[in-house]
Image: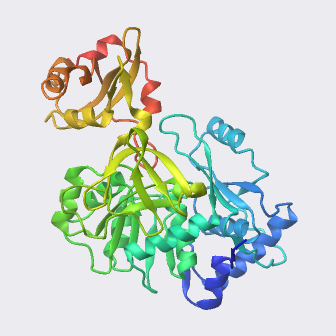
Amino acid sequence: MTALPNPLAASARARPAHPALETAEGTLDYRALAKAVARRAGALAAEGVRPGQVVALTGWPSRAWVVNAHALMWLGAAPAPLSPRARATERDAALAVLRPDHAVDGQDDAAGPPLDPQPWLLKDRRLVILSSGTTGPPRPIDLSAGQLVFSAMASALRLGHALDDRWLCCLPLHHVGGLSILLRCALYGTTARLHGRFDAAQVAAALDSGDVTLVSLVPAMLSAVLDARAEVPFPPRLRAALIGGAATPPALVARCRRLGVPVALTWGMTETASQVATRFPGDLDAPMHAGPPLPFAEVAAGPGGALVVTGPLAPGGRLETRDLGHLDDEGRVVVTGRRDDVIISGGENIDPAEVEAVLKAHPGVADAAVVGRPDPRWGERPVAWVVPAQADLQAEALIDWCRARLTVFKAPDAVFWLDALPRTELGKLSRSALLRQQPEPAQRRRE
């Protein structure tokens, strides 16, 4: 079975004095980080952690948390990061799903005799990530060493690679988008700058300092960062802002185009270790698409319009995704919706994304989401949850607006009002949270 040296150990040999990790607590170079990781791995081994085991990793992102994550992989275990925001019941449910061999506090910095790093066998499980649970309960997703390595190499080929890169990490580390930054930097021998929590003003200041070359954000974060700074271009040293995790609103894309933000729109998922298709930085020309597939990935439209990924990024070499879409004439990936979200009403398929786009085009709507509700006659019928931008907005007017622009059966039967749509930490709409809402009939009309 093909084996690679541990990425952190390899970079420590190649660039021992180069900054590896920057946090509020200071900077560790690769020599110091590898030493701390080896000693932490020794302590974990003394506590009974063994190669191949799954270990739940808790706590807020910090220098110690990163050392623990690397230490688990150093000794051949698979960390399974848990959300630090989770309530006790949510954490218990996550542990019941994961059934880890051990649980480790990410702030524990106890050291032991240093261990030699275990090699990375490409087929070995190296990470376990809980899905975000936007359409149902979270589920554990195994990621192999091969997926992580091919993902890192493919990302570098699309975004570019420089030895003095600094990648700002302000995404949650219990999601693959944040954790992949730490792993990619360790593999590249470059610098990861970690923000323990997302703060738009702090991120804006870091980007405006001219020290950061790469940043990963979700659209809601990008919008907040732009709001926290002057409407001026970023320093030229920022060469790519990787934006994914949710659909990027056209208005935000237009704003980035005006400012010359080097945005790289991307489409990917946890199961593929992050990116699958990515536009080149700064390519924001219409039409909107997710870019061509990365090297090492093939994408095609499968049965029912589901996008299928093949190649070493996909688990087992092939993944039929939950996303619907197609490839355009130039081979670029166009994502049109989610298979899980499709509403089947009287034998007709209704794509919520299509209805949501019509609702959001109304001048009185700030945000909107559409879900299917059980119906005794039709099986399901669409209903809309709307964040109004006008105090006098009427539900009936919105339904009429949709009926004038969509086939009649696609128009929502009812409209309910919310101050904000429920979203995950990555800004994804949580349809499962909407389905748990129990609106009163009076909410159908906004008085």
Q: Is residue 337 above or below residue 20?
A: above
Who's the residue at 61% across and 42% down the image? Answer: 139
Measured as percent of width and height from the top left, residue 195 is found at 48, 65
Measured as percent of width and height from the top left, residue 299 is found at 41, 56
Measured as percent of width and height from the top left, residue 320 is found at 49, 47
435 vs 392, nearest the viewer = 435
Who's the residue at 42% across and 41% down the image? Answer: 303
Q: From the viewer's perspective, tell me whether residue 447 is left or right of residue 144.
A: left
153 vs 252, nearest the viewer = 153
Q: Is residue 355 above or below residue 55?
A: above
Asked which quadrant contains residue 276, the reply is bottom left
Measured as percent of width and height from the top left, residue 169 is found at 47, 66
Q: From the viewer's perspective, tell me whether residue 54 is left or right of residue 314.
A: right
- Quadrant in the picture for the C terminus: top left
Can residue 399 be seen? yes
Who's the residue at 53% across and 75% down the image? Answer: 185
Who's the residue at 72% across and 65% down the image? Answer: 72
Asked which quadrant contains residue 5, the reply is bottom right
317 vs 276, nearest the viewer = 317
Q: From the viewer's perspective, tell me whether residue 281 is left or right of residue 83.
A: left
Asked which quadrant contains residue 384, the reply is top left
